Image (tube, rainbow, N blue to C red):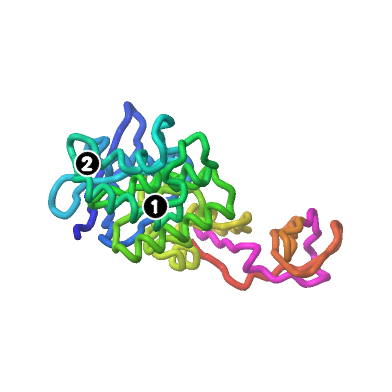
Amino acid sequence: MDDLQVRNVSRFFGESVALNDVSLTLSAGTITSIMGPSGSGKTTLLRLLAGLDSPDVGKVLIGDAPATLGEAALCFQASPLYPHLNVWDNVAFPLKLKAVKASDDVVDQRVRRVLSMLNIEQLSGRKINELSGGQKQRVGIARALVRDVKVYLFDEPMAHLDQALAREIVADLRKIQQELGLTFVYVTHSKSDAFAISDQIVILVDGKVAQVGSAEEVVDKPTTLMVAEFLSPTELTVRRSGGDVSAWRPEDTTLTRGGAAVVESVTYLGREWLVRTNNGAAVTSQHVEVGEKVTLTPTKVFRF
């Protein structure tokens, strides 16, 4: 199996810089999630990995050879399924193209395998308009996985699904990847998806690699304030002194009654409250009232 290598890649669109000197190694047999704010270059990078586009500077390699169209399978937010075909024929379609032309036995074996792995074998005879949104997305994923390629690319595949269904499909994808030892690249805005599925997370900001690491590393040891802000489920408290920046999350802040900070709002999160004050915020199991005075003490501080 071959690693994917992105070597000093830049991509320009007129005067706009989509990617700026990006270098990465995406290890074979692993899942790498690519995250970042809108416009950070995630989809541009995915298109380069797929061979759908070429860099203006640098190289994209699979092993030692340039990435070319046909070496990757793509799954999108809303996969373009064929309404006149049933589920089986939609999934089998890539194997029947002239460039592939797999034998009937190979088609049957591969389609059965991916339908079973994604728990949709019972839907094989249905037309696309008879499926729910989650079922359609499973069919789209199956049509990508049925191909025998070097890398499988996913562009926000859960974006239109509710959280419970997305979690279920993400768990199935992780299981399939581990069982078959496939190489996945997964572009997402969802932190929960990325944390659940990834061996490695790449965070792009303004077309540059801001940080690469495991879920634990990027969450617990962000290298920049922007990364910390992007990954925080709630707003950070930030303090600047000269050229030094300190920041902490409400989840890493204790609240005690009495003090100088005045509570400005209280938001119920399900089991805890997010308490915002005129001097920062805390997530706490204590219920306090707006106008009450409290003390906030950070237990973990990031310094940049």
Please tell me the numbered disc located at residue 115. 1
Q: Count neighbours of disc 2 (C-alpha within 10 A) and say few if under 14, some if 14 to 19, many if 20 or more.
A: some
Q: Amino acid at mark 2?
A: Gly
Q: Which percent across, then down, holds residue 40?
A: 42, 42
Residue 212, can we see it? yes
Q: Count neighbours of disc 1 (C-alpha within 10 A) and say few if under 14, some if 14 to 19, many if 20 or more.
A: many
Q: Amino acid at mark 1?
A: Leu
Q: Which residues are magenta?
A: 243-266
Magenta stretch encompasses residue 20: no
Task: Kindly identify the residue that appears in the image at 19 percent across and 49 percent down.
Answer: 61
Q: What residue is disc 2 on?
A: 70
> In which quarter of the view is residue 155 placed?
top left
Q: Nearer the viewer, mark 2 or mark 1?
A: 1
Q: From the viewer's perspective, is 120 left or right of 287?
A: left
Front residue (pair 86, 209): 86
- Establish if 15 lies above or below 10: above
Front residue (pair 272, 75): 75
Task: Kindly identify the residue that appears in the image at 41 percent across and 37 percent down.
Answer: 86
Q: From the viewer's perspective, is 30 left or right of 205?
A: left
For label 2, the SS is loop
Q: Which percent across, then down, holds residue 229?
A: 54, 54
